[in-house]
């Protein structure tokens, strides 16, 4: 089983929603594992074998109840300052990117395929997270984590829109329209994230988006002031952590998010059905 969480923009909630789904599955007897083919992150984590992955996949691994490993984030870019980006491949420093220099896409894809294959063979469900937005037309030909991953492994996708930014229906529909036509059948559902208010007022808009796209709404997630690990300068979950153990505090916050999602009628079982299809 596998599913890909895409976002209409950076910081739409992909990392936290993926962690929430991982936590829910693990609590219900399904062995999930996180996977982000390509990550751009200021904050990284050292795995037990001395490798390096993005903090988001570490957080998601904790949510799964498993040890973070390099296969969870096979390609990581770390800003180094002065226009330099360090490319980390398979958890190890690979090359510095500067002055237009790029990593060989075939090399990156080979690492992604190998890492994904090992995870898929060892767990019940791979919860994949996209990177940024899948609708960046100038990047689509070289994409690794969004449309690139959809093509590479045929993974079904769920699109997350952040209503806190405004224009969530336009963002969801516009993103879907810009997805290549041959990949649109893999776009199965959408989630509206960070809503403050009475969800029933969104009913007409949700039904129209479902009619226009063929995607169905899995639910409207409420805004909660909860603290989660930060990956980069765009992250800003706010909130607080309680207790002396930050890792447990993050899990307690995830449990609170799951409880709120279930109360709001979020369709966790729909995620499983999509992953099986």
Image (spheres, rainbow, N blue to C red):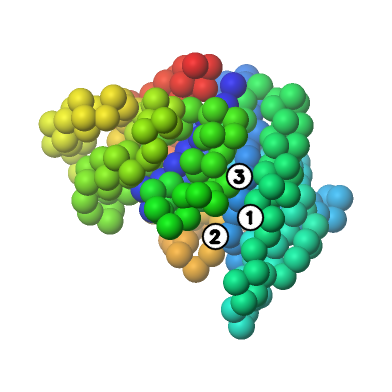
Is 116 left or right of 10, judged from the image as shown? right
Q: Residues within 10 Å of mark 2 (few under 14, many from 20)?
A: many
Is 141 left or right of 116, judged from the image as shown? left
Q: Nearer the viewer, mark 3 or mark 2?
A: 3
- Which of the marked residues, 1 or 2, is nearer the chain's N terminus? 1
Give the residue at x 78% y 62%.
Answer: 93
Asked whether 221 or 162 is in front, the reply is 162
Give the quadrant of residue 230: bottom right
Secondary structure found at label 3: loop
Q: State whether residue 223 appears in this view.
A: no
The residues tagged by marks 3 and 1 sit, at their Cα atoms, a distance apart of 11 Å
Q: Position of residue 255 (x, y in %)?
A: 51, 37
Q: State whether residue 199 appears in this view.
A: yes
> Which label was assigned to residue 160?
none
Secondary structure found at label 1: helix
Circle 3 sits on which residue? 36
Circle 1 sits on which residue? 55
Q: Residues within 10 Å of mark 1 (few under 14, many from 20)?
A: many
- Which of the marked residues, 3 or 1, is nearer the chain's N terminus? 3
The residues tagged by marks 1 and 2 sit, at their Cα atoms, a distance apart of 7 Å
Circle 2 sits on which residue? 230
How many labels sit on residues?
3
Give the quadrant of residue 229: bottom right
Q: Position of residue 47 (x, y in %)?
A: 79, 52
Q: Position of residue 173 (x, y in %)?
A: 26, 40
Asked whether 79 or 28 is in front, the reply is 79
Q: Residues within 10 Å of mark 3 (few under 14, many from 20)?
A: many
- Which of the marked residues, 3 or 2, is nearer the chain's N terminus? 3
Give the residue at x 16% y 35%.
Answer: 205
Give the residue at x 43% y 32%.
Answer: 183
Asked whether 236 or 92 is in front, the reply is 92
């Amino acid at each position: 089983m596998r599913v890909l969480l895409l976002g209409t923009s950076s910081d739409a909630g992909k990392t936290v929603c993926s962690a929430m789904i991982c936590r829910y599955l693990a609590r219900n007897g399904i062995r999930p594992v996180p996977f982000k083919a390509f990550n751009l992150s200021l904050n990284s984590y050292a795995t037990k074998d001395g490798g390096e992955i993005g903090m988001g996949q570490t957080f998601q691994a904790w949510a799964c109840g498993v040890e973070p490993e390099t296969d969870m984030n096979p390609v990581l870019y770390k800003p180094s300052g002065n226009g330099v980006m360090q490319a980390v491949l398979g958890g190890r420093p690979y090359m510095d990117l500067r002055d237009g220099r790029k990593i060989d896409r075939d090399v990156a894809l080979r690492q992604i395929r190998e890492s994904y294959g090992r995870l898929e063979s060892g767990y019940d469900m791979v919860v994949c997270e996209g990177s940024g937005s899948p609708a960046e037309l100038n990047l689509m030909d070289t994409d690794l984590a969004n449309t690139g991953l959809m093509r590479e492994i045929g993974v079904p996708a769920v699109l997350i829109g952040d209503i806190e930014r405004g224009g969530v229906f336009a963002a969801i529909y516009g993103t879907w329209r810009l997805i290549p036509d041959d990949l649109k059948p893999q776009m199965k559902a959408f989630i509206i994230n960070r809503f403050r208010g009475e969800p029933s007022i969104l009913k007409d808009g949700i039904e129209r988006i479902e009619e226009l796209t063929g995607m169905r709404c899995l639910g409207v997630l409420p805004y909660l002031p909860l603290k989660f690990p930060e990956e980069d300068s765009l992250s800003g979950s706010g909130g607080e952590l309680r207790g002396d153990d930050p890792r447990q505090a993050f899990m307690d916050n995830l449990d609170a998010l799951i409880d709120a999602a279930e109360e709001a009628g979020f369709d966790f079982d729909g995620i499983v059905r999509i992953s099986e299809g």
